[in-house]
Each structure stands twice: as structure tokens, then as C-alpha cells.
Image: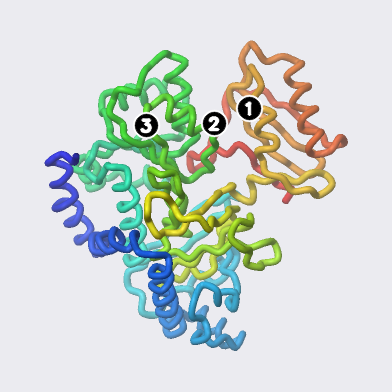
Amino acid sequence: MASLYTKFITSCVFPLHEKLKKHDTVVIKNTMEKSQWWSREQLRAYQNERLQNLLKSVNAHVPYYQRLFAENQIDINTIKSAADLPQLPFLTKPVIREHSDSLKADNATDLARFNTGGSSGEPLVFYISNERVSHDVAAKWRATRWWDVDIGDPEIVLWGSPIELGSQDYVRLVRDKLLRTKLLPAFEMTEAKLDSFIENIKTWRPKMLFGYPSAFALLAKHAAERNVSLTDLGIKVVFVTSERLYDHQRETIEKSFGCQVANGYGGRDAGFIAHQCPSGSMHITSEDIIVEIVNEQGDVLPVGESGEIVVTHLATQHYPFIRYKTGDVGVLSGQPCSCGRGLPVLAEIEGRTTDFIVAQDGTLMHGLALIYIVRNLEGVEQFKIVQESREKTRVQVVVNSAFDDKKELMIKSGFKQRLGEQVEIVIEKVSEISAERSGKMRYVVSHAL
């Protein structure tokens, strides 16, 4: 049951905060809390209506799409539903970089500049309107409430994005204090930092945690090694996002904090795509998001088949994201969730396309094929696999006294079995594994795809 303070925040303070920022978050969230219980047919009808309105708007106001429709003789009136979207070409990161200004609607007055570094480190600059922000925040708010926690409940955020950490001005500090949110930087995960994070959690006694799965898994492992119990603090849920969540991470986190892990999937570019409910399903925010799964040739795949996730965000009329290729790999489910929500389900989110590796003979496989070899070895504390080319793969490992020459040979032998006997495997023993510039941790990086 929510405290009086939390009720005050959710009914007064946060709505005022959003109104001052000219966001319609509260109205949208209230609508979404009703629409999540609609049937799939009702949700599809609503989605189709919004898609048609989005296409009419971009056709009237977005120079890039005006030219695209004209040059390709595309009649938007023939696009009635998600099934008709293959009439339109994909939106890719190179296209956005090349046509950034012409993707802005001529009637847009509230665009804010954003960027994301991506796996290559090359910035992707794009723009987001108040409409888009309102919908994404509302979707996240709704998903938060699935877990019996709410805005205003004590929260610790373990994060590493320069955008968040660079905006800790007075207004932000006051807002976080009112909302009872404490931000801890995930850039440095030294033993001293981990000790301080644990003390912060024990002192703050949050109802929810939010951050990277790799960061919380490392923190949970550190607490277990020091026999520090975190199961009696009243934490109800650990929200994780921005990286692939592995089964062993979920198990480690849940055991350490004594609560469930709720996986979230999305990004600044693609939006708030899906979130896990307490029944275990990853529900797509289908009021705002259309998800297609496509193969390497760009053909839409049926439910149950694995391919690249392509997103159309329906609240992006001022800077459209239509058939945007996310670079992520996933699988749609045709099964309803036992929770009763009509929202469709992502059965799998398998990771970035760059989380995959390619053998010397061209065989494509998930990075897990190599991860399991290293992860299960006694003596390996941390690791990172970098496929430089089809001929060379480098493995960085942080090891303890249990690691010996035999373990090193096991890594090389296991990798060669999967990648090819002629592939050079280089083992680098390091004191620490550096996170990405964003603070995220990536276990596999391939430059050979």
C-alpha cells in the first residue's frame, strides 16, 4: 500500500512537474492503464488509427517523407495497418545522420536534441518532441505500477549515462529529493565504490532499484562475497534495462536482493518498447509502438522466428521514427500472458546484432556460444570477448589464483571449436574490465560482422 507521501507525489507533485514541462504524461498514463486490458483486436484497431494519423501528419509536414512518398509513388492511403508497413523503406541510423534536418516537421516547435553513441561510438543525433516524451514517460510509469511501486517511493538508480550525470543542477537535485530518487554513478565499479553503493542501499532502504543488469549483478556478487545480506531492506523489485539480461544475472540479483528482477527494453532512439510484468511476459507498449521482426533481406518474419527488431513509434509526428531498424534481435510471441493484459509479448530479446559472432566459415552464432565457455571457468572473475576479425578474437579476463595455464588452454580450445581451428585466440589478463563510455558493460563485441 502506497504511503501518504507517495500518494502526494503521484497525485500532486509529479503531475505539476509534468505540466510545467508541457507534458501530457498524466492523461496518457491514465488512458494506458485502461487500454492495457483491451483485447488484442481493440488494441490493433487503436494502433491502426494512430498509424494512419501519423502518416497523414508526416506527409503534410515532414520534408524527408514528402520527398520519399513522392519519389517512390507511395500512396499513404493504402497503408491501413501494420501489415501494410512493408510498403515503406526502413529508417536506419545512416539515413537519420544524412537527413537529420529534413526529418523535422515544419510545424514542430518543441524539439529537443538527443544523441546516443551506439556500439560504434559514432553519435546518432536525433530530436524528440514533448508528445514523444509524454508517451514514453507514461508507458514507463504504467509499467512501474505493475510491481506495486510508484513515483515517490524511495528509489536508487545505478546509471552511467552522461546525459543523466551531466544534468545534476539545482533543479534536478531538488526534484530527485522530492521524488526520493538517489542516483549512483555506474562508471566506476571498484571494490571501494561497490562498498559505498551497498552502504547507500542499506541506509536509503529503497522500495525499487533501477539500472544496468551487469552493474547490479556485480554489486550482488560483491555483497555475497562479503556476506552482506540485502534481502531484508524491503526492496520490492529491481528494474533493469539498456543491456541484455542474462539468466545468471537475474538469478544472482534476485538471490541477493530477495525480490524479482523486471526487465525493460527500449532506448532514447526507439522509445519505451516493452517491459516485463510480474507474470514474466515482456509486454510491448502497443498503444505507441509497432514491432516488426525482419530477416537480413528485410522481409517481415512470422511470429516465433528470430530477426532484427524494427520499430514504428506512433508518437513521433514531429520527428518520425517509422520502421526504424534498432539493431536488436528478438522474437515475437503469439501467446497471451496469464496476467490478462491484451498487450502483445516479446518472447525473446536476444541482444544487439553486434552481440553476435561469426565463425571463420561464415556461420553466425550468438555470443552466448563463447560466453558460456569463459563464464563457467573457475578462476575467471570478469571477462570481455572482442572479435577483431574472422581470423582473430581477443579475450580480456580478470582472474584469481584458481586460474592457471590449463584454464587458458580450455578457453582457446573451446573458442577454436566454435570459430575455427585456424582462428587466433589471444588471452589478455587485465586488472579490470572497462565499461563502455555510457557506463554499460558488454560481454561480446564483434567487428567481423
Looking at the image, which residue is at 86% across and 35% down?
A: 421
Looking at the image, which residue is at 67% across and 61% down?
A: 295
Residue occupied by mark 2: 248
Report how far apart the C-alphas of labels 3 and 2 lie in the structure: 15 Å
Percent of width and height locating residue 130:
32, 65
10 Å neighbourhood of mark 1: few (<14), some, or many (≥20)? some
> Type of residue at label 3?
Cys
Image vertical order of residue 333 relative to residue 370, above or below: below
**Circle on res. 259:** 3
- Figure label count: 3
Looking at the image, which residue is at 87% across and 36% down?
A: 422
Looking at the image, which residue is at 56% across and 64% down?
A: 292
In the visual, does 357 lie left or right of 329? right
> Type of residue at label 1?
Arg
Mark 1 or mark 2: whose residue is earlier in sequence: 2
Between 83 and 435, the one nearer to me in the picture: 83
In the visual, does 44 lie left or right of 181? right
Say what secondary structure mark 3 lies in.
loop
Residue occupied by mark 1: 375
Percent of width and height locating residue 364:
74, 48
Mark 3 or mark 2: whose residue is earlier in sequence: 2
Percent of width and height locating residue 9:
17, 47
Percent of width and height locating residue 370:
70, 35
Q: In the rendered structure, are the residues bearing label 1 and label 2 in contact, judged by CB atoms less than 8 Å apart?
A: yes
> Type of residue at label 2?
His
Q: In the rendered structure, are the residues bearing label 3 and label 1 in contact, judged by CB atoms less than 8 Å apart?
A: no
Please indicate, yes or no, whether residue 120 appears anywhere in the rendered image.
Answer: yes
Say what secondary structure mark 2 lies in.
helix
Mark 3 or mark 1: whose residue is earlier in sequence: 3
